[in-house]
Amino acid sequence: MRVAYKRGDLIHIPQAVRLYQFEDVSIDQGRGQSVTQLGITRYEETKKPEIAIITGVAPASRPGYLRVYCGGERWAVEGASVFPLMGAAHD
């Protein structure tokens, strides 16, 4: 079952789930052409279960990812790897 998360929802992130930070990277394709893609600049794996707050969805170039605030930092996490916090209402 896929959950329709909204900004402000609380989620449970299990242990051993990767959290990512992305940044736009410009790639030179030659002949004066370049393309901008989203590149991973940093990642960490959760060492223990965490609670995070949804801040939005990740860009279209990373479908299925959620933007979250966890451990004092902003991250992206694969939506299939997280769960709604028990007791939270979802549509």
Image: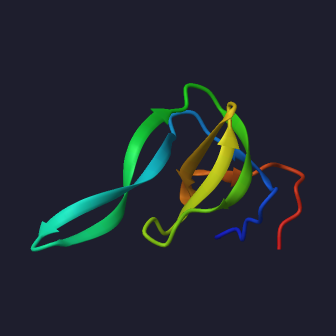
Q: Residue furthest front?
A: 32
88 vs 84, left or right, is right
Instruction: Give 60 or 47, whichever is nearer the viewer.
Output: 60
Counting from the top left corner in percent of width and height, residue 27 is at: 23, 61
What is the residue that sits farthest to the top in this orientation?
47
Q: Quadrant of residue 32?
A: bottom left
Q: Residue at x 23, y 69 (%)?
A: 34
On screen, 24 above or below 60?
A: above
Q: Residue 78, percent across and down?
A: 52, 55
Give the residue at x 62% y 55%: 67
Left or right for 55, reference 48: right
How many numbered marks does the figure carry? 0
Q: Determine whether 56 is above or below 22 in the image.
A: below
Which residue corresponds to the image point at 77% horizontal and 65% vertical from the top-left?
A: 6
Say above or below: 40 vs 15. below
Of 7 and 11, nearer the camera is 7
Q: Nearer the viewer, residue 47 or 22?
A: 22
Residue at the spot x=89%, y=62% of the render?
A: 89
Residue 65 appears at what percent x and percent y?
54, 60
